[in-house]
Image: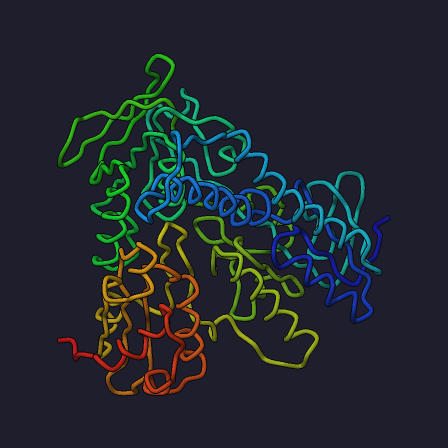
């Protein structure tokens, strides 16, 4: 006989635990199911551990540049990868333990560990346990996509998950893929001291960004010694002694890259292929993402999908916002929708890229009449003072409504500066409100009003 609950939550990523807290706080009896590691991708193989490693890489980079700031560092700077991993493990492990402890001590919450599969639209089985509820929330996240690439099955390779176990410095790390995960790891391991080559099928890195952003990112990486191979239309891999050989068909350079280790970072796929979704009447799209409406309801009444598995965003903040939307609609008598949120994210290369709204190319494709302000970081005193003047800021405004429709801040503090622009976008006020605001000196943000005062009509 099935154990009855008011709600079942499958997965403990960024949406599941806070939703459990809200539901139990409302007096509901909740079952939470976790297959493996509490906290999901962000805590275990994503944001928290990788940004901890980025911080270690940044420390190494600053140490090597110490003389640029008039600081003498005796001896050669070296990186102890075992200590880097240990620090990462401690930070990540602390977050994971905190999430697990929170759930296990939460009044009204029962934790089940195992793989959940649907028996019916109202029943879930976890091992020998059968659970039933009128409300079920799926928060199972995603994993690295492993492509059908010639030779890949015959060689050892790393993904973002297995990279978390690396406690050594690869002699030459070859990365297939030129998007955000790839770029962060490329710069990180180059700063640790490895030779790094990025192989990208497209004609530029970070293909969803505007050309000027992609070019600036490429320049940043090349300036640090990362090798970039673009236009690799015929990628294949093979064993090469103790290492690996990656076959290319590129515009320039040798037809092969030889490396000691291979890292595959070509995208993500949802963890939806072994949940028995068909037994619950839950539809998925061609890539396996669960189909949801703007309130995150699936095609099966009483079942919601939150986080990476619904294809509405692949970020920690979008997953958490999914929780806020569902909780507000169910418990707070509000009407919130995914359609109301403005796309925003950051890429944690150094300096970072902060993005909000639509890109210039998207705006042109949509026929939006545009004003644009742009300022290189070489004209931002705060960046120059820090010796990190690469990149630029760019803001796009609808010339008719005078509202900001998009922005890119590639530079020192870009991941933070973007939020003042994002907040003005949510407020729905003209860009002149931000332009007239007095900012603190010396900061990066103080140049945003200046940039807005220099807007030009785009043709």
Q: Quadrant of residue 283?
A: bottom right
Q: Is residue 282 left or right of residue 411?
A: right
Q: How is the image coloured?
A: rainbow
Decide: is 163 above or below 459.
above
Q: Nearer the viewer, residue 426 or 89?
A: 89
Q: Position of residue 356 (x, y in %)?
A: 38, 68
Q: Residue furthest top?
A: 241
Q: Nearer the viewer, residue 322 or 449?
A: 449
Decide: is 194 above or below 105.
above
Q: Quadrant of residue 393?
A: bottom left
Q: Is residue 319 left or right of residue 204?
A: right
Q: Is residue 191 left or right of residue 367?
A: right
Residue located at (47% from left, 73% from top):
339
Q: Position of residue 162 (x, y in %)?
A: 51, 33
Count up the numbered dots.
0
Decide: is 76 above or below 281.
above
Which image quadrant: the C terminus? bottom left
Q: Position of residue 144 (x, y in %)?
A: 47, 40
Q: Position of residue 422 (x, y in %)?
A: 42, 73
Q: Residue furthest right?
A: 1
Q: Quadrant of residue 23?
A: bottom right
Residue located at (36% from left, 30% from top):
194
Q: Is residue 221 left or right of residue 97?
A: left
Q: Nearer the viewer, residue 73 or 331?
A: 73
Q: Nearer the viewer, residue 212 or 83?
A: 83
């Amino acid at each position: 006989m099935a154990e009855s609950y008011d709600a079942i939550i499958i997965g403990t990523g960024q949406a599941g635990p806070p939703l459990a807290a809200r539901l139990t706080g409302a007096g509901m009896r909740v079952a939470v199911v976790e297959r493996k590691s509490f906290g999901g991708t962000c805590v275990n193989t994503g944001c928290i551990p990788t940004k901890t490693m980025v911080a270690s890489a940044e420390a190494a980079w600053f140490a090597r540049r110490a003389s640029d700031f008039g600081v003498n560092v005796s001896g050669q700077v070296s990186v102890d990868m075992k200590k880097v991993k240990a620090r990462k493990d401690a930070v990540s492990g602390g977050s994971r333990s905190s999430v697990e402890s929170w759930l296990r001590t939460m009044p009204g919450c029962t934790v089940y560990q195992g793989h959940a599969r649907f028996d019916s639209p109202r029943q879930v089985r976890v091992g020998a346990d059968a659970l039933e509820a009128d409300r079920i929330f799926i928060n199972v996240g995603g994993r690295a996509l492993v492509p059908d690439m010639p030779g890949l099955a015959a060689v050892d390779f790393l993904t973002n998950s297995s990279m978390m176990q690396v406690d050594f410095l690869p002699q030459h790390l070859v990365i297939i893929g030129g998007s955000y995960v790839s770029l962060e790891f490329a710069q990180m391991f180059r700063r640790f001291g490895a030779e790094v080559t990025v192989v990208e099928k497209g004609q530029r890195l970070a293909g969803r960004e505007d050309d000027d952003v992609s070019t600036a990112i490429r320049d940043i990486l090349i300036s640090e010694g990362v090798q970039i191979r673009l236009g690799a239309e015929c990628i294949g891999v093979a064993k090469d002694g103790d290492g690996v050989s990656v076959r290319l068909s590129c515009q320039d350079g040798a037809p092969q890259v030889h490396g000691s280790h291979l890292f595959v970072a070509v995208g993500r796929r949802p963890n939806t292929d072994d949940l028995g979704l068909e037994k619950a009447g839950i539809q998925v799209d061609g890539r396996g993402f669960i189909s949801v409406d703007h309130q995150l309801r699936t095609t099966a009444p009483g079942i919601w999908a939150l986080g990476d598995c619904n294809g509405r965003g692949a970020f920690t903040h979008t997953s958490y916002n999914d929780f806020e939307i569902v909780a507000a609609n169910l418990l707070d008598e509000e009407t919130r929708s995914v359609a109301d949120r403005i796309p925003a994210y950051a890429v944690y290369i150094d300096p970072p890229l902060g993005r909000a709204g639509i890109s210039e190319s998207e705006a042109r494709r949509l026929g939006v009449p545009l004003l644009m302000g742009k300022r290189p970081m070489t004209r931002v005193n705060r960046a120059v003072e820090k010796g990190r003047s690469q990149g630029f800021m760019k803001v796009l405004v609808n010339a008719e409504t005078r509202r900001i429709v998009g922005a890119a801040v590639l530079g020192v503090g870009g991941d933070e500066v973007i939020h003042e622009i994002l907040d003005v976008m949510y407020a729905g006020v003209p860009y002149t409100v931000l332009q007239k605001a007095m900012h603190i000196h010396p900061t990066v943000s103080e140049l945003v009003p200046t940039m807005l005062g220099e807007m030009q009509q785009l043709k």
